[in-house]
Amino acid sequence: MLSRVADSLYWINRYLERAENISRFLEVSEAMALDCPPGSAEPWLPLVEVTGDRYRFDTAYPDATPKQIVRFLLLDRSNPNSIVSCIAMARENARQIRDVITTEMWEQINDLHWSLQDDEEIWREPVQEQLRIIRRGCQLVYGITDTTLSRDLSWLFSQLGRLIERADKTSRILDVKYFLLLPSPEEVGGVLDELQWITLLRTVGAYQMYRQSMQQAIRPASVARFLLLDPIFPRSVRYCLQGISDTLQQIQQHPSQKTPDDLDCLRGQLLARWSYVRIENLIEAGLHEAIDQLQQDLNQLHNLIQTRYFTSADLRSTPTDPACALSSFTA
């Protein structure tokens, strides 16, 4: 497979997964904003921090009102990580490889892109409904891809991009609540604290599966364990890392060297580290620090994949990779 084709497939899925997850981020803040004073930016600014775009946002929107934050993350085309920008880039990558993806995939990505243009019907809906429509549109692409694309290298690079982005965003959305929005000591375990954890689980589509798996009261440690370490929930970090490892092994069915290189080592180390660790140990050592290190490792993994599979003389630098992986947030 040409490196530019693999690169486009990888980024189509990263961009769509990123758009879907940012819509989930916004839904969390929409729900949390109901419990804050009107006009307060408290539940919104952490989203800008976590996406690594604080400097760009402060430059464009010095007032930092909730409406401006929503616009920046949802509609602002000058922000390469806004939802409309991500979907536009996914569409552009898909346009360049229309002969590789299926017609149904192209039609859904194209329709989703054009439905988000100015003055379209979607923008007359409430924000929550706009986010739901966008999320469903991204999920339709996933479903169409799963049912129409052959399980060859095209499928594998598509899966790789989706899983890396999902692992990163699951960890980030947990970090929003666990670190940035940690309540005061007297509020821990209170009604508001529990409602926020429930909102977090619903945002990543994990509430029902968490209840079935844990069968206990909602506690921060058990939520963190489920989202980070559960081996069978498809949005957990551990599940994604297992999928990343399996996918990379399938891509490289016939290794060209006897000793593992940097990519092989990092793939195996990441999977082992997050497969054989207890949540109590992570919390004791600092959960935010562990999540931050995970995000740095995922960025390094992306760079190694880029070097091995996508870098070549015929690979165009744009529009396949202008945003790369989101920068890691550090307090």
Image (cartoon, helix red, strand yellow):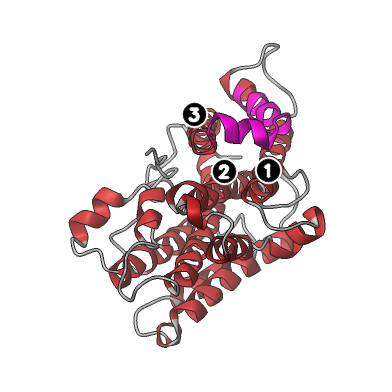
Rounded to the nearest angstrom, the CA distance separating label 3 from label 2 is 12 Å
Location of residue 303 with respect to 130 vertically, above or below: above
Which comes before the other along the chain, label 2 or label 1? 2
Residue at position x 41%, y 49% in the image? 50
Q: Mark 3 points at which residue?
A: 307
Q: Name the disc covering residue 6, or none.
A: 2
Q: In which quarter of the image is the C terminus?
A: top left
Left or right of 152 in this view: 11: left
Q: Name the disc covering residue 153, or none.
A: 1
- Comparing 75 with 70, the one in front is 70
The answer to whether marks 2 and 1 mark residues whose Cβ atoms lie closer than 8 Å is yes
Location of residue 208 with respect to 56 vertically, above or below: below
Q: Which amino acid does label 2 sit on?
A: Ala
Taken as a whole, is the magenta stretch helix, strand or loop?
A: helix
Location of residue 278 with respect to 225 vertically, above or below: above
The answer to whether marks 3 and 1 mark residues whose Cβ atoms lie closer than 8 Å is no
Residue lying at the far front in this picture: please name it. 186
Judged from the image, the secondary structure of the residue bearing numbered disc 1 is helix
Q: Position of residue 176 (x, y in %)?
A: 47, 52
Mark 2 neighbour class, 10 Å CA radius: few under 14, some 14 to 19, many 20 or more: many
Provide the residue span drawn in magenta: 266-286
Q: Where is residue 148 in the image (x, y as percent from the top left)?
A: 73, 62
Q: Position of residue 28 (x, y in %)?
A: 50, 65
Q: Look at discs 3 and 1 and give the one toward the viewer.
A: 3
